[in-house]
Image (cartoon, rainbow, N blue to C red):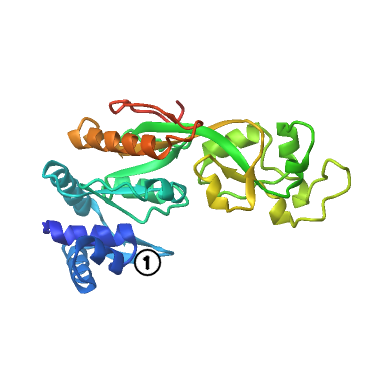
Amino acid sequence: MVTLECLDALDHLIWLRTGARAAEALGCNQSTISRHASKCEHVFAVKLRRQSAEWVVNGDVELLAAERRLHQLYRWEMNLPLRFETQHWMRDLYATWQPADWRKGNLNYLEYQRPVDLLRNRIIDAWLCGAPDLPDDPDLICVPLFEMAMLLAARHDHPLLRQQSPLTLADVAAYPLLPLPQGAFPVFEARLRELGLGTPADGMPPQDSAGPANTELSFAELCLGIASALTLPLYGPEYRSLPLEIPVHFGDVLVIHADFAGHRRSQALIDSLLAHIGEATAEIASVRLLGDRRHTATSPSA
């Protein structure tokens, strides 16, 4: 009902959030993006509305959804650029990865619901999320790429790094964790609660190993950060990893629509990602590649 260029403009605007980014990705000007998006609004009898930092479509989207299914299939079959997105903590790892037939997005999501919606609505074609929180949707498949151990990051002058005796989970549980986006990672948060982590009493700084309350650091500086071997550097040079094994593992998981589970371009994407991850993490012993799963689907409870 509309041209590929028209729907591309609308969906890039929704995906990339601004007309400037959409125009840059599509090699046109912002007025073209605006004109095409307006035409889609007219043809499908919908309205774009700004909701916080995101664009949302209001109205009956049945016809728009049908058009997106057709256009997505056309993109996949005709070797047109496909659309790839990740979470913000994965940004550095994939910054230098750029296969010729995939277009990367903003790579800055802090929560999961928005990218899941973009994938379900066929606005994007692939998304990297982090295990253990995976989308529970029979229309999507999850392909684990690698896993690594969870670390806790602390300031270099944190009391736990001065403790002489070996650290235990009980020692760590006395300190608060830096907050996560509320409700964004329910499986991971439940695992932390099982371990007794992230629940400081009354929000007060804990006692250090010497007995008196620690007064050298502020409450925020006493907080522990959740990290991995890949994300620890994001905290800056002031932070170190605690010498304690946390029985939780993270992992990057590729999520694509089930319609393309056996598609040659899905396997090419997996191969490309695994090759990049292997090269980028070759010196990091804690990263374990999960190999070529040939689209082995994973459920959130697995």
Q: Is residue 24 above or below residue 114?
A: below
The residue at the point 24 percent across, 60 percent down is 25
Indicate the secondary structure of the residue bearing disc 1. Answer: strand
Residue 253, quarter of the rendered image: top left
> In this figure, which residue is indicated by the disc labeled 1?
50
Task: Where is residue 48? Give x, y as percent.
Answer: 30, 65
Q: Position of residue 7 (x, y in %)?
A: 18, 58
**Neighbour tally class for label 1: few under 14, some 14-19, many 20 plus, Cα within 10 Å:** few
Q: Quadrant of residue 43?
A: bottom left
Q: Is residue 192 visible?
A: yes
Residue drawn at point x = 28 percent, y = 68 percent: 19
- Whether residue 58 can be seen here: no
Q: Specify the farthest residue to the bottom.
A: 31
For residue 275, side relative to residue 193 (left or right):
left
Q: Quadrant of the C terminus?
A: top left
In this view, the residue in front, 103 or 201, is 103
Q: Residue at x 50, y 33 (%)?
A: 148
Residue 32 in the image: state x and y as whole percent.
18, 70
Left or right of 241, for residue 287 = left
Q: Quadrant of residue 277?
A: top left
Side of 155 where 119 appears, left or right: left
Q: Is residue 13 left or right of residue 4?
A: right
Image point (57%, 31%), residue name: 248
Q: What is the quadrant of the N terminus in the image?
A: bottom left
